[in-house]
């Protein structure tokens, strides 16, 4: 019996060896053929393609994330709406990331886009306003540039409010040298466990916590080893140019579709509150963070001036104290912050609408020509 087991094992190993040898011979033959052939190989282009990481994720449509969040049938946070704009409605789309989605508020109707709709309808007289919350946590301006062209223009908006900078600045500050890579921004397929248990709230929360801990360790390691990162000035300069390109492209493409864009400058907790920023942004010092936000807000002003987009200065809103933000978080509004920011944004938006400052500039495609 023992001898038979050994013979079976030897036979199995010999079979595997033959198969591996034949496979190697076949691979060598194909490679040799491609190196000497004189005809174009046609559709066989191995190694040319890989799955790219844009846009990375989206919300499950028509879905309740329990009592905090409702995603409607079009994939936006808030009440139901239609692709076709109702007659007589001035439709605004608020585009951004988690600070537009408003992850820190306790209900859909308390997010600043929802509160902005309420205030505009209170102040706007006979005009009816609709504000769609198109924020997606984690998105940069590049993600929303893609989304503008693939999804948002079909909603026929009369105005887009583009509120961006946080994620773009964070990405720039976390940049590492990394070196050249053949597959930048490669999409990593979901883990098998994620696919199996993707519908489990328990699994999702545990997995999310573990990912946050891993990210925090990675950022802490980078902060503890600054020699592994490019100098702050290099990271900031590169980030500013990427942000300028993204915002300018977004505004320009919206204008081609006859859609004006309004650009609020970015609001945060007072950057002199170093404890908040040291804990939340370990890859740069609080002073560097302040310089970064100043530079990114300057980009917003410059793009607005050069392309004719309206800019709203939000420094005067006074939403820069601890009481307006999630505990320990310097950028995400709580209920009070979202309420106050919307309350002060509403008259600034209305002033520009009624003053005619939100028309697409000369040279853009008229609305009747585009897909609106």
Image (cartoon, rainbow, N blue to C red):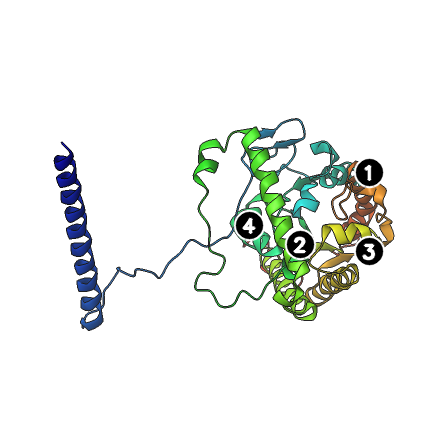
**Mark linked to residue 271:** 3
Q: Position of residue 190 (x, y in %)?
A: 46, 43
Question: Residue at 74% across / 58% down in the picture?
Answer: 310
Distance of mark 1 from mark 4, alpha carbons? Answer: 30 Å
Distance of mark 3 from mark 4, alpha carbons? Answer: 31 Å
* Number of the front mark, 1 or 3: 3
Distance of mark 3 from mark 2, alpha carbons? Answer: 20 Å
| Looking at the image, residue 42 lies above or below residue 327 | below
Classify the position of the N terminus by image quarter: top left
**Mark linked to residue 147:** 4
Q: Position of residue 239 (x, y in %)?
A: 64, 64
Distance of mark 1 from mark 3, alpha carbons? Answer: 19 Å
Distance of mark 2 from mark 4, alpha carbons? Answer: 32 Å
Residue linked to disc 2:
220
Quadrant in which residue 258 is drawn? bottom right
Question: Residue at 54% across / 42% down in the picture?
Answer: 58
Question: Residue at 57% across / 29% down in the picture?
Answer: 202
* Number of the front mark, 1 or 4: 1
């Amino acid at each position: 019996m023992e001898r038979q087991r050994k013979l079976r094992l030897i036979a199995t190993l010999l079979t595997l060896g033959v198969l591996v040898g034949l496979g190697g011979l076949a691979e060598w033959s194909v490679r040799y053929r491609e190196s000497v052939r004189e005809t174009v190989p046609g559709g066989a282009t191995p190694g040319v393609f890989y799955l790219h990481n844009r846009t990375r994720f989206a919300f499950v449509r028509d879905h309740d994330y329990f009592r905090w969040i409702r995603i409607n049938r079009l994939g936006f946070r808030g009440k139901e709406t239609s692709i076709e704009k109702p007659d007589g409605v001035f439709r605004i789309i608020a585009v951004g990331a988690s600070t537009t989605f408003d992850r820190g508020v306790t209900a859909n109707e308390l997010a600043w886009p929802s509160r902005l709709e309420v205030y505009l309808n209170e102040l706007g007289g006979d005009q009816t306003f609709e504000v769609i919350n198109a924020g997606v946590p984690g998105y940069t301006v590049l993600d929303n540039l893609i989304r503008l062209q693939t999804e948002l223009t079909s909603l026929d908006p009369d105005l887009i409010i583009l509120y961006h900078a946080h994620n773009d600045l964070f990405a720039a500050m976390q940049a590492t040298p990394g070196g050249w890579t053949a597959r930048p921004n490669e999409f990593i397929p979901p883990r098998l466990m994620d696919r199996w248990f993707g519908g489990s709230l328990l699994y999702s929360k545990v997995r999310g916590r573990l990912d946050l801990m891993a990210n925090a360790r990675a950022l802490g390691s980078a902060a503890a080893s600054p020699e592994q990162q490019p100098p702050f000035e290099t990271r900031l300069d590169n980030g500013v140019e990427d942000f300028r390109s993204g915002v300018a492209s977004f505004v320009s493409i919206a204008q081609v579709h006859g859609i004006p864009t309004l650009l609020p400058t970015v609001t945060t907790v007072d950057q002199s509150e170093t404890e908040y920023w040291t804990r939340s942004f370990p890859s740069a010092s609080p002073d560097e963070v302040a310089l970064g936000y100043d530079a990114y807000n300057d980009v917003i002003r410059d793009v607005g001036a050069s392309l004719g987009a309206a800019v709203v200065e939000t420094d005067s809103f006074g939403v820069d104290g601890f009481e307006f933000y999630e505990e320990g978080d310097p950028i995400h509004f709580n209920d009070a912050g979202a309420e106050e920011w919307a309350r002060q944004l509403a008259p600034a938006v209305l002033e520009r609408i009624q003053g005619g400052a939100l028309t697409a500039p000369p040279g853009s495609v008229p609305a009747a020509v585009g897909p609106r």
